[in-house]
Image (cartoon, rainbow, N blue to C red):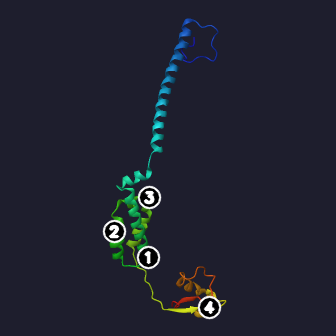
Amino acid sequence: MFAQTEKLPDELPKELNQKQWEFVRDLYAVDAIKLLAKMDTLALEIDSLKQLLIYTENFDCEAELYALVGATKEQVADYRRKFDEAESYINSRSSSPDDASKNYYNSISASKIRCLPEFSDRFVSLKNIVDNYVPVKTEKISVDEYIVAEGDNLTSIALQLYGTSSSWKLIWEANKTEIDDPDFLYPGQILKIPSKPR
């Protein structure tokens, strides 16, 4: 008899006696119960996944991030404006370290909004600048004027005034607001000519 194996043989006899039939029925009943339990478990998983899908479709990541730092969308927009202004001012290094800290850095560092992904790396960069702050020394230069003649270009003007054509960038930097393209000058145009640095 195949009762000891707890598994049906590959081929069943054509006719089963009562005990064999009951054994086969019980095996199928156990399998059916296991499959029903598995089906219930899968149904619960499907419901759970459906709920998760609904949650993720309606999830506002930005609002969640703002809630973590205790800010509203409007407060983040205001902070963004202040941060951009502070970043520009600190990066220019045009003032003393105390002035940069008091007027700009301290106000942006006091807010938890700096921890948002949009600001965190930029804030670390600003902190490094403030910690190692060295103001940029601006050198006063005297400026002369030059009236562009027919056939002039920045290279030829630099060669004529500075003795080297590679100094054309000095003239370009001093006249960026007046010259749209460094390759095109027009006769009669007045250029500011800075003194050559030593």
At numbered mark 4, what does the secondary structure look like: helix, strand or loop? helix
Q: How many marks?
A: 4
Query: What label does residue 159 carry, if any?
Result: 4
Say above or below: 76 vs 30: below
Query: What label does residue 92 carry, if any?
Result: 1
- Tell me the residue at 44%/76% (across/down): 92
In space, the residues marked 3 and 4 are separated at their CA atoms by 50 Å
Residue identifier under label 2: 106
Of pointers 2 and 3, the one earlier in the residue sequence: 2
Of pointers 1 and 2, the one earlier in the residue sequence: 1
Of pointers 3 and 4, the one earlier in the residue sequence: 3
Using a 10 Å C-alpha cutoff, classify the residue at mark 3 as few (fewer than 14 neighbours), some (14 to 19) or many (20 or more).
Answer: few
Using a 10 Å C-alpha cutoff, classify the residue at mark 1 as few (fewer than 14 neighbours), some (14 to 19) or many (20 or more).
Answer: few
Q: Identify the residue at the far front of this view.
A: 188
Q: Is residue 124 left or right of residue 146?
A: left
Residue identifier under label 3: 117
